[in-house]
Image (spheres, rainbow, N blue to C red):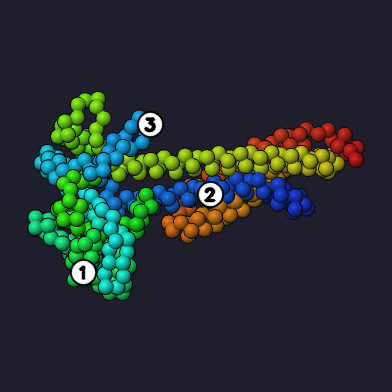
Amino acid sequence: MNLWAVLNTALNALNVNKGRTALTSLGITIGIAAVIAMVAAGRGAKAKLDDALGAIGPNLVVGMSGSTTRSGLRVGVADGAFTSADADAIRRELGPMINGCSEITQFPAIASSEMGSYGTALVGGMPEVFRIRRWKFRSGRPYNEEHVKRQDKVCVIGKTVADKLFPNIDPVGKTIRAHGQRFRVIGLLEPKGMSITGADQDDIIMVPISTLLRKVMGKTKTLLIVVEARSPGLVDQVKTGMERILRERHRIRPGQDADFTINSIRDMAKLATTFANTLSGLIFAIASISLVVGGIGVMNIMLVSVTERTREIGIRMAVGARTGDVLNQFLAESVILALIGGGVGITLGAMCAWVIAIALQWDFVISVESIIVAVLTSAAVGIFFGYYPARKASMLDPIEALRYE
């Protein structure tokens, strides 16, 4: 019996019990759909993470005030741990390896204009911060070194602040009042959206670091030092160099806890990727269980089918069908059952992935590799769980099969 005849016979047999065929394929459908949806969701999340890192700066190294205890809790430093001299030392010693360095600190404040008020934060930084963080300007310009030296009351604002305080107008040239000070808006940033931590990067009022420290906060130390390495390959060297310089300047002995921690954006991204991969692995394991259950269902139904069609098998063998013909027919039925479930599962999984992508606002990515794997997996399940019933059918004694009622 040729392949076409085997497939045609198998399809006709499955068509007799459409409801049973559909229910038998359901377990495989669910398993394949879960695999397709989670692979697509994982790729979409990875693409969104890459975009977020590109917006932040994938080569950033961040020094944060406060130490981490053995229990994993951060002990904060209320006034900050870093001075401008710390940042100058990093610029001087790591200059060939970095694109820029800026001390940063922030102060919560109620900002107001003639058109309203809004609770946000004043963020102080050096002019380099705009290049390091890859901020682009929709209008106006950044502040410069002269503004920092003179402690000028100028600011650059994000789109969220602009929408709240200056709806439908260009804020450049306008005045913002915050913490008893009046700041002139000299620049409006292009929107950047949410960060990888879920924070709104456009909810920001950037001012010269000297202005914020001396005229608003009355302090000299900052919470952060942000450095951009010249290339991904230099990130670890910059991180090690920053830790060495800061430990020397802060007189921290070997083995003693520092009053700061150093992390790179790449390290943070690895944590997010590890979490996503762990979750995807868990879903994949659950989907695999569903595939096994679906495969057992296929085997069970095929065994029932062999019992129901014992007399039919006897007649086929009596008119000349060989053992291999019977084996191939029932094996083809089980593979087709699994492929039907796989085909529906691919469609359902793609639809679920599309809904997830819309809901979470990331790219809809379906890989050809995952579809090929799904098809091959479906066929493998059909062959693996269908072989025993098919073998049992092919080993029936024709005489006994003809006598079966």
Left or right: 316 as drawn, with respect to 361:
right
Front disc: 2 or 3: 3
> In this rendering, would 216 be left or right of 194?
left
Please say if 310 is above or below 207: above
The amino acid at mark 2 is Ile
Residue drawn at 12 percent across, 57 percent down: 151
- What separation in Å lies between label 1 and label 2 (alpha carbons)? 53 Å
Q: Position of residue 394 (x, y in %)?
A: 76, 36
Between residues 392 and 268, which one lies in front from this camera angle? Answer: 268
Q: Is residue 170 above or below residue 96?
A: below
Structural crowding at the residue carrying mark 1, measured as other residues with C-alpha within 10 Å and reported as few (<14), some (14–19) or many (≥20): some
Residue at left 19%, top 55%?
A: 216
SS for tag 3?
loop
Q: Are marks 3 and 1 in contact (CB under 8 Å)?
A: no
The residue under label 3 is: 71
The numbered dot on residue 156 is none
Q: Of tags 1 and 2, which is closer to the observer?
A: 1
Q: Which residue is mark 2?
A: 36
View extreme (bottom): residue = 169
Q: Quadrant of the N terminus?
A: top right
Can residue 3 be seen here? no
The three-letter amino acid code for the residue at tag 1 is: Thr
Across and down, in percent, residue 217 comes to: 20, 52
Disc 3 marks a residue whose amino acid type is Ser
Determine which quarter of the picture holds residue 184.
bottom left
Crowding at mark 2 (Cα within 10 Å: few <14, some 14-19, many 20+): many
Q: Residue at x 64, y 36 (%)?
A: 384
| First along the sequence among labels 2 and 3 | 2
On residue 175, the disc is: 1
The C terminus: image quadrant: top right
